[in-house]
Amino acid sequence: MKNKTSIQGSWASRWIFILAATGSAVGLGNIWKFPYITGENGGGAFVLVYLVCILLVGIPIMMAEVFIGRRARKNPINALTDVAEESGSAKSWGLIGLMGMLSGVLIFSFYSVVGGWVLHYIKVMLTGEMNGISSDDAGAAFGALLADPATLLGWHTLFSIMTVVVVAAGINKGIETATRIMMPALFVLLILLLGYAMTTGGFAQGWNFMFEFDFSKLTWNAALIALGHSFFTLSLGMGTIMAYGSYMTKEASIGKTVLAIGALDTLVALVAGLAIFPIIFSNGMDPAAGPGLMFISLPVAFGQMPFGQLFGVLFFVLVGVAAWTSAISLLEPTVAFLVERFKMKRITASISLGIVVWGLGIACLGSFNFMSDVTLFGKNTFDFLDYITANIMLPLGGIMIALFAGWKVKDKFAQDELNLPSAVFKLWNFSMKFTAPIAVALVLYFLINPMK
């Protein structure tokens, strides 16, 4: 292709791209969802199935997104359009990028609200409001937060501004600088919390919960959960990885880079579980509390433990960093599109998009209070946007990217970017043509029609 560099800039090194993409992948789900589903679905046996799914589905689709972005050096819509045209296919494949970018914008609108909850709990832990609190009082405090639109609006606004400021500063001064600071900080916080968890007396129980091999729990449903999470955990289907790939240098190996991202993402999720569940078990709490685990159970646990206030603050800072790095990646593809297609200045594009998603976020936070009676297909705004993005748009985008890369992109163009050994390329190509789209189609089907 004629355009060999992105007008947005490029990553300073391969490792910066790895950290940025890992930051995108590591989010709120890694901190509580993955450890919990691991424990509930066979522990170590589930982890093995999950890793197989990562290798067969997640990694191949991620490689496709990266090479499409890098080959075109443009935003997801233009990248897909250009690569399709180069391969003699219809330009309408660019619509996959449009759906992905729309998914990112819609996800940010409610993700920012949850990010606001996390910021609120950093403040709550700092002030010691949770010290010695009971579970009932902690539940009431969380309920009171959800019922207070003014407080939710303040934190949602702050989280939105934090994200827009980084994106507006650009690839090198914004996202790259933030990545250099936040990702090492995330790893340090994880290690500190893991060390603390090892002193609680519940570490062995937490380890067994997550890693004890229990093949009796490896049901068909457990395999579907592993398959689904292997797709969602890598931020696939929303254009983020494609946009980040467009800033990747030609010399960097896509295969090795994507494997490193998958490994780091999984490692963070597992270590987070080992840091959280010993605290839960040592306080006799339920590890299956879902979102309540983060905002009710853990604050109570920290409030009753030695040095709990300090480590409670560190925990919510960790969660805040994870949420922030993910949120940045949700806005980047659309900002890149606005800059490239409409020649907008990056700061103007970032602020304009920030205002739009901030407004959508108000409708989402209103789902818990002043707009609680407003429903779409029986769901409030927050739950509807969560459902339509996670259950329909992202998996559909993943299927289409796999089919596009496997059936429409000429092999010589894909191999030029991936630079894989012949046998490995054939395996990747087979995955794109058959394994990945069929697997993600299964996820899509069972998300819409859950097993009973």
Image (cartoon, helix red, strand yellow):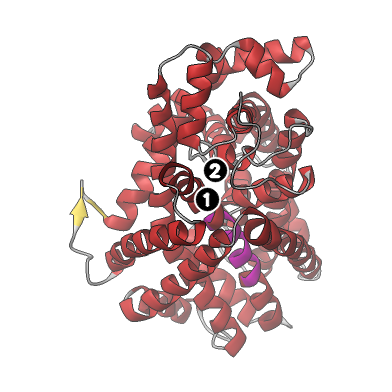
**What residue do we see at 71% from left, 62% from top?**
186
Label annotation for residue 436: none
* Earlier-in-chain disc, 2 versus 1: 2
Question: Please, what secondary structure does the residue beneath circle 2 have?
Answer: helix
* Residue 156: % across, % down: 42, 70
For this rendering, which residue is in front, 20 or 206? 20
Q: Label 1, secondary structure: give it.
A: helix
Q: Quadrant of residue 298?
A: bottom right
| Residue 405, x across and y down, in percent | 55, 19
What residue is disc 2 on? 240
Tally of numbered tags: 2
What residue appears at the point 69 percent right and 16 percent down from the top-left corner? 415
Amino acid type, mark 2 = Thr
The answer to whether residue 101 is seen in the rendering is yes
Q: Label 1 neighbourhood size at 10 Å, few (<14), some (14-19), many (20+)? A: many
In this orientation, does residue 440 appear? no
Residue wearing tag 1:
332
How far apart are the two marked residues, 2 and 1, measured between alpha carbons?
Answer: 7 Å
The answer to which image quadrant residue 258 occupies is: top right
Q: Nearer the viewer, residue 6 or 435?
A: 6
Between 49 and 327, the residue placed more toward the observer is 327
Please tell me which residue is depicted at 62% across the width and 44% down the height of the picture: 38
Q: Amino acid at mark 1?
A: Glu
The N terminus, quarter of image = top right
Q: In the rendered image of this protein, does residue 84 appear above or below residue 241?
A: above
Horizontal side of 181 relative to 216 (left or right) equals right
When the figure is inspected, residue 300 is found, relative to residue 434, above or below; the finding is below
User: Magenta residues, as a range?
Assistant: 317-327
The answer to whether 169 is drawn above or below residue 312 in the figure is above
**Residue 306 at what x, y percent from top left?**
73, 83
- Judging depth in this view, the residue of 398 and 181 nearest the camera is 181
